[in-house]
Amino acid sequence: MSETPNSYRTGPDERGHFGLYGGRFVAETLMPLILELEQAYEDAKADPEFHAELKHLLDHYGGRPSPLYYAERLTEHLGGAKIYFKRDELNHTGSHKINNCLGQIQLARRMSKGRIIAETGAGQHGVAVATVAARFGLPCVVYMGCTDIERQAPNVFRMKLLGAEVIPVTAGSGTLKDAMNEALRDWVANVEDTFYIIGTAAGPHPYPAMVRDFQSIIGQEVRSQMMEAEGRLPDTLVACIGGGSNAIGLFHDFLDDKDIAIYGVEAGGLGLGNPDEHCASMNGGKPGVLHGNRTYLLQNDDGQIIEGHSISAGLDYPGVGPEHSWLRDTGRVSYVAVTDKEALEAFQLCTRLEGIIPALEPSHALAHVTKLAPTLPSDNLLVMNMCGRGDKDVFAVAGLLGVEM
Amino acid sequence: MTTRIDTRFAALKKEGRAALVTFTTAGDPDYDTSLALLKALPAAGADVIEMGMPFSDPMADGPAIQASSQRALKAGQTMKKTLQMVREFREGDSDTPLVLMGYYNPIYIYPVEDFIKDCLEAGVDGLIVVDVPPEEDEELCIPALKAGLNFIRLATPTTDAKRLPTVLQNTSGFVYYVSIAGITGTKAPDPSEVHAQVARIKAKTELPVAVGFGVQTPEQASAIADGADGVVVGTALVKIIESSLDSEGKGAPEAVEKVTKLVRSLADGLTSSETVAAK
């Protein structure tokens, strides 16, 4: 365990480090651009006009603020904590990803970059990127693993409708890690005119901090919405973790409210026994360097990255954002894992009890809520980030439940 | 301290020709074929040997070298076996400089201190680690330099005048100029542009400059060598290994022969060309 810091909200340092984690581990070709991006982001942060434009887009195009909803029937069913959903699945494009994409496309325009690239796993980020690229008339290329293309077909078609080129990646197991490798290769080759919109709070500095900043609006809204609903702050926060952008978005504003218990839920796949069968990098991995940052990774003893497995394409990634790694080591956030099966059960429970079809990603957070809530008193205010809607998953879930469509 | 790399480049400068730097991946397509190839390279005309340490996620490499990395890992190559290969090579060759190229994670996991120690003991002369830029120098570069290994840095078309001193600082052995903005083996470099860039780098350092990332044919190598101290050829060699696999994907003995044949013609091309060093 690291020493307890005075504040959990001051990171990263000027070199992009969250304690041991983060940094800028990229090829030299990218370094000048990474430094340029860092400067451009610093300038944008200090520019009130940037914030005003972004707020306008978030409110009128993205649909913010998203509601904080009291999940009454789920609360009654579980018989414990009072459960609220932060409804980021109601955003334009159906997930929290639009928050970050609107921020980064504004930055791309400030930097006069004329071409947008992205990686995507579940396709939620890809759809959000294709959407903002269409909105601002910029050509867009999305890299997506071929396994994910198969299990998230509706999102592939959405991206194409939006005018994006979707390039299938066959390397590795054809999931998010491989898509990110390929996007990095594209970026290196087109560094002059291309802006890479990374979808999660990982990658080389300044991406982890930048994506977190753009997603932090989730937690900021929860703070004021909960004050309005209950007259006080929440007691418990729960969010799922792949790279961890929705989670850090919910958590960050509350990290220094030390009485609030915070849980990040990793994809436990078929169980944590075999490293090939889950994607819980913080529960079953160790620190390493991949995709521009040091963080917890699933890897073998020789430092080769293990593909992992999750039912959810959005969580099927062998790493995690570096700030989460640091929050894990400091003990501020508890990181747990739930299995594919538990997530699938939570998916069905929520659909029937609340009339909300969650994406398979937040179904992991929900599964942990079903375990946690009954252990808590009824005055415990629990907020779970409903970070995506499940429309994209219905075909895959039908298959898993043995239903022919 | 003078390393094999320094000695070799100084000798070639006297001869007035550029160094041929060959790249192959350690353990591709299997340990024995790869070692046989390694041993055959100096006699075929390789002046400096660059050997790739296979990694599951080679972000800076094109399809050919990605596939070679995957073949090696599938055949059971590990970091320890790569160092063992260097040891076995050194038993019969104490002069040819050997540089290991790769990505940081397997070194970090090794871990760094032990890796540097084992490199020195095995007879490695230098390291090229793609994803450790100067901003992260204290991770690996400084400890490697202190221990007596060369740390060879990549300079690229995006390394502008402002950044070049940062890249050159803490670089030793030679500077590796990446001739294209992109990944290995995907675009052909423009020789005149490369020569201008190499001249720009040479104005700021005494170190030799070798050029790589897009050089595939003897003609290209010869044209690039006219303005550089060395030429790196990798993808073209790795593609020969790929094309000589048998129907089960296993290495064939003629792979060594075919690769060394290309190395010989690359070397002949360099001998007949005049280098910057001689001018």
Image: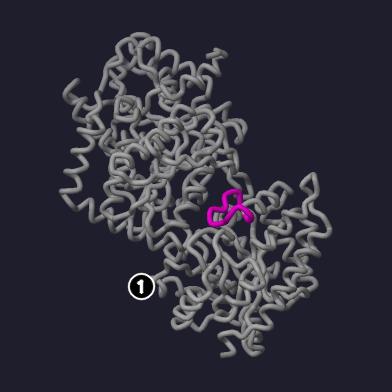
Q: Position of residue A224 (x, y in %)?
A: 19, 29
Q: Residue at x 48, y 42 (%)?
A: A143
Q: As rendered, which of A115 and A389 lies closer to the eye?
A: A115
Residue range in magenta is: B55-65
Query: Colour scheme of this structure image?
Result: one colour
Name the image quarter holding the N terminus of chain A.
top left
Query: Mark 1, chain letter?
Result: B
Q: Residue at x 61, y 73 (%)?
A: B231
**Helix, strand or loop for the magenta stretch, by majority:** loop
Tell whether A199 sits left or right of A148: left
- Magenta stretch encompasses residue A273: no
Tell whether A236 sits left or right of B48: left
Q: Is A96 located above or below residue B34 in the figure? A: above
Q: As rendered, which of B67 and A270 lies closer to the eye?
A: B67
Q: As rendered, which of B185 and B57 lies closer to the eye?
A: B185
Q: Tell me the SS state at disc 1.
A: loop
Tell whether B126 sits left or right of B123: left
Q: How many marks?
A: 1
User: Is residue A332 among what the camera can see?
Assistant: no
Q: In the picture, residue A136 is in which quadrant?
A: top left
Q: Position of residue A211 (x, y in %)?
A: 34, 44
Q: Position of residue B188 (x, y in %)?
A: 55, 65
Q: Is B231 located above or below residue A51 in the figure? A: below
Residue type pointed to by label 1: Lys
Q: Position of residue A382 (x, y in %)?
A: 31, 22
Residue highlighted by disc 1: B162
